[in-house]
């Protein structure tokens, strides 16, 4: 009995030793392999300023320590990390997992955008009284409206009265207008913080602005004796007093840019401006109504005479004529109106000045058609219209009190690309003159 008991005790101790030895061997074997990351970890993220995301990558193996590193600084030694930023930018975050076998690394690339990056901006030319400074309204992804967001982001400041348009170059909006003190205000398009302004100008009546390099540009003027394109020095922050030769009769339309050149209708001519020189590309017997870009970077020029058919002319990358399409006599392109296109689909839109109806031309079928009659939906005076490049929807701003002075508010009407009235949003701004869609 005693021998059996001793045998059982010895066997029990042996089993314990075997189990311990096996555990030790297992640990040693485990630590000879680095910790691995799961294959399906998403390492590219996008979020807005102030938003946060918790990063907890899935691991295979046992880690002894962790490191979250940004710009050489260890931010945390936990297995997860809550990432948030107060400023837009592209951020790189490194996650290290370490055990006896070594280190394995995962790199996150996180893009942080401003709170206005994904919504639609509406440029008011005045304030609620119809006499004060301009401002911006914001329509977020849920179509929730917030008024006067420029003032909100700039300590109560306003844009100058009589704003005319906003031109995007890079991540900046160049907001131009005829009112003082700022003829051009440069605004970050994601944060709406003003970064610069131009208060010195040799001319008045400034309307639209464009640049192809962010250093120089041109404005046109509504002053009858001062028509033409005038040079803008964005470094010196000045607008010149002498128009560029060859642009004296430049139309008061938004200025089209293509690569490093500017294209502008000058009465019956299409003029290219590049490197400070104006060159006449084409001279027609009819007025040039405008130039727009459609899908696949196609460039189209509209031409309209008094007694002749309207024409849409396609140009190639070298601005040579590829084809000419005559429209039916029922369609008239506006001599001093606006041709507009999203740049992302095949349609070119315009408003018939005699009826107020909006029409469009398909660059695919080469046919024009009536699009919508906004008066049927209660719209009385359109002050801005543009196409949403994301879905082809047509936005029209109605400012019915612009002539009476009784009400400066504007209403937004939205139509699908299939000619259906989708929505009206009331009081989106004050005499709205431009719409800025997200990049």
Image (tube, rainbow, N blue to C red):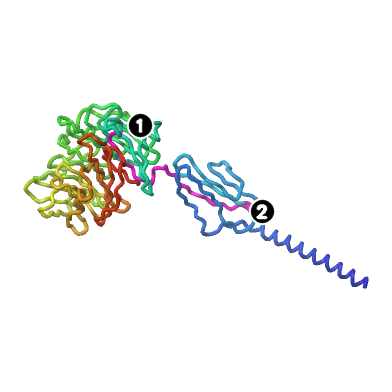
Residue picked out by circle 1: 196
Residue 378 pos. (x, y %): 22, 47
Between 288 and 418, which is closer to the camera in this rendering?
418
Q: In the figure, is residue 70 to the left or right of 297?
A: right
Residue 421 pos. (x, y %): 26, 53
Which quadrant would residue 405 be assigned to in this image? Answer: top left
- Which residue, as the protein is rendered here, is positioned at the far front? 406
For label 2, count other residues whose C-alpha is less than 10 Å away and answer few (under 14), some (14-19) or many (20+): some
For label 1, count other residues whose C-alpha is less than 10 Å away and answer few (under 14), some (14-19) or many (20+): some
Q: Earlier in the sequence, mark 1 or mark 2?
A: 2
Measuring 59% from the left and 47% from the top, which residue is drawn there? Answer: 67
Residue stretch rendered in magenta on the structure: 98-127
Residue 182 pos. (x, y %): 30, 29
Residue 79 pos. (x, y %): 60, 50
Image quarter (top left, top right, bottom left or bottom right) of the N terminus: bottom right
Measuring 14% from the left and 53% from the top, which residue is drawn there? Answer: 324
Q: CA distance from mark 1 to mark 2?
A: 55 Å
In the rendering, which numbered label is found on residue 434?
none
In the rendering, which numbered label is found on residue 100?
2
**Residue 209, visible in the rendered structure:** no
Q: In the figure, is residue 86 to the left or right of 170?
A: right
Q: Is residue 356 above or below residue 196?
A: below
Between 382 and 56, which is closer to the camera in this rendering?
382
- Which residue, as the protein is rendered here, is positioned at the far left? 307
Which secondary structure, mark 2? Answer: loop
Q: In the figure, is residue 15 to the left or right of 141?
A: right
Q: Between tags 1 and 2, which lies in front? A: 1
- Our reading of the magenta stretch's main secondary structure is strand
Which secondary structure, mark 1? Answer: strand
């Amino acid at each position: 009995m005693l021998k059996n008991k001793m045998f059982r005790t010895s066997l029990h101790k042996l089993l314990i030793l075997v189990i311990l030895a096996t555990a030790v061997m297992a640990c040693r074997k485990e630590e000879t392999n680095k910790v691995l990351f799961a294959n399906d970890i998403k390492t590219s993220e996008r979020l807005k300023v102030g938003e946060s995301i918790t990063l907890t990558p899935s691991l295979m193996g046992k880690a002894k320590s962790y490191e979250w590193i940004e710009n050489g600084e260890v931010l945390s030694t936990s297995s997860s990390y809550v990432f948030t930023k107060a400023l837009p930018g592209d951020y790189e975050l490194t996650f290290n997992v370490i055990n006896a076998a070594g280190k394995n690394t995962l790199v996150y690339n996180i893009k942080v955008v401003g709170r206005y990056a994904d919504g639609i901006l509406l440029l008011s030319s005045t304030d609620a009284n119809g006499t004060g400074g301009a401002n911006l309204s914001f329509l977020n992804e849920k179509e929730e409206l917030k008024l006067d967001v420029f003032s909100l982001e700039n300590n109560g400041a306003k844009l100058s009265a009589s704003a005319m348009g906003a031109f995007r170059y890079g991540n900046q909006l160049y907001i131009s207008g005829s009112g003082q003190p700022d003829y051009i205000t440069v605004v970050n398009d994601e944060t709406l913080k003003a970064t610069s302004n131009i208060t010195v100008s040799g001319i008045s009546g400034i309307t639209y602005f464009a640049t192809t390099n962010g250093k120089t540009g041109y404005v046109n003027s509504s002053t009858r004796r001062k028509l033409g394109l005038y040079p803008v020095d964005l470094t010196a922050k000045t607008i010149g007093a002498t128009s560029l030769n060859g642009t004296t009769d430049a139309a008061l339309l938004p200025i089209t840019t293509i690569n490093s050149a500017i294209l502008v209708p000058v009465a019956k001519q299409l003029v290219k401006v590049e490197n400070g020189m104006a060159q006449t590309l084409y001279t027609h017997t009819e007025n040039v109504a405008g130039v727009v870009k459609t899908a696949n970077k196609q460039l189209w020029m509209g031409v309209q005479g008094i007694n002749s058919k309207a024409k849409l002319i396609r140009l190639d990358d070298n601005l040579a004529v590829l084809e000419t399409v005559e429209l039916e006599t029922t369609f008239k392109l506006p001599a001093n109106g606006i041709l507009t296109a999203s740049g992302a689909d095949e349609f070119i839109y315009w408003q018939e000045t005699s009826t107020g109806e909006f029409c469009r031309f398909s660059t695919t079928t080469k046919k024009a058609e009536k699009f919508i009659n906004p008066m049927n939906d209660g719209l009385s005076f359109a002050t801005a219209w543009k196409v949403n490049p994301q879905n082809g929807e047509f936005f029209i701003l109605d400012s019915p009190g612009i002539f009476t002075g009784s009400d400066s508010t504007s209403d937004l009407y939205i139509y699908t690309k299939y000619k259906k009235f989708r929505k009206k949003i009331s009081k989106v701004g004050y005499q709205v003159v431009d719409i800025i869609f997200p990049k």
